[in-house]
Amino acid sequence: MTSWLLAALRSFTWPAMVLLAAWLLTLLTMPFRARKGGARAETQSIIAGVVLQVATVTAILLSDWPPLQVGGTVAGVLILSWLAEFVGSHTGFPFGRYAYTRRLQPQLGQVPVLIPFAWLMMLPPAWAIGGAIAGAYHGLAFVLASSLAFTAWDLFLDPQMVAWGMWIWQGSDRKRSRRRSGYFGIPWSNYAGWLGVSALITWAWSVLVPQQTLPREALTLIYALTWGMETFAQLVFWHLPGPALSGALGMGICLLLAALGAPW
């Protein structure tokens, strides 16, 4: 474990390391700034966290891929995820009936611009996990493992964002969401949608950007840090023990399978 962690850290370029430190500092201080500054500070912290994680992941990709390949991947993920969110929030397919509130600004087509970047910040780490499990960056096993690793993150995300009022599910009362049907008030169709859309984006990436290498150690570290910090924060600060334990189990299983499958 220690040798893998050191290898992962050594794989970071200096720009990626600086961005990683800034991202971690933002996440570590978020509960205290949110408690002191209220909803506005909470929203600002979310935006800063997403921006810094996207920057970190992009810097990691640039350390291994040519800029044109990174740019194509970034553009493809942003466009496809925005389209999925636009269709989903207006039609209810494939996630279910939901709507974004006004808290996350700016918005494009009533979808916060930040949301596609949230997809971008976790899809490459999920690809690293999927590649470790499947032993390749193409094929059905890779697509399935990657989409499961990505969707496992939403076991944390959706209940927390609904509790904070970032979006609302049709007919939901976020104050009573933990007592509602589905997954802590989130319809199961949401997770089917996450699986389907992330699988589609992953398949498109694997076909259009044939890739034999990926900075797997560094991206796996991003996935592992997200897992650990989400678990700790939801248990200790946000008082969401159910999603914390479920998310810890879901992402933890993905990390375990990746560790068993990867040549570390």
Image: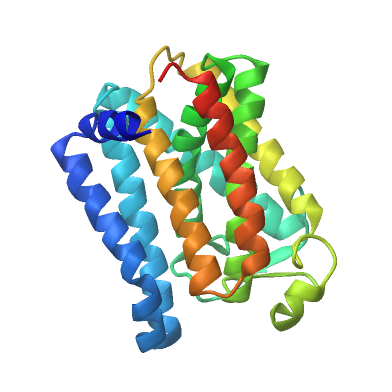
Which of the two residues, 85 or 167, is positioned nearer the viewer here? 167
Query: x, y percentage for residue 121?
Result: 43, 45
Whether residue 113 is visible to the viewer of this picture, yes or no, is no
* Farthest-out residue, right: 181
**In the displayed structure image, the side of residue 212 where residue 168 appears, left or right:** right
* Colouring mode (rainbow / by chain / secondary structure / one colour): rainbow
**In the displayed structure image, the side of residue 194 where residue 113 appears, left or right:** left
Which of the two residues, 58 or 154, is positioned nearer the viewer here? 154
The image quarter containing residue 29 is bottom left
**In the displayed structure image, the side of residue 65 where residue 75 appears, left or right:** right
Q: Is residue 50 above or below residue 219?
A: below
The image quarter containing residue 66 is top left
Q: Residue at x 44, y 57 (%)?
A: 229
Which of the two residues, 83 or 151, is positioned nearer the viewer here? 151
Whether residue 146 is visible to the viewer of this picture, yes or no, is yes
Query: x, y percentage for residue 232?
Result: 48, 62
Q: Residue at x 80, y 75 (%)?
A: 179
Locate the C terminus by quadrant.
Answer: top left
Q: Residue at x 67, y 18 (%)?
A: 140
Q: Residue at x 59, y 51 (%)?
A: 248
Locate the N terminus by quadrant.
Answer: top left
Q: Is residue 91 above or below residue 72?
A: below
Please tell me how many numbered marks the rendered image carries. 0
Query: x, y percentage for residue 168?
Result: 68, 71
Which of the two residues, 109 or 45, is positioned nearer the viewer here? 45
* Farthest-out residue, front: 2
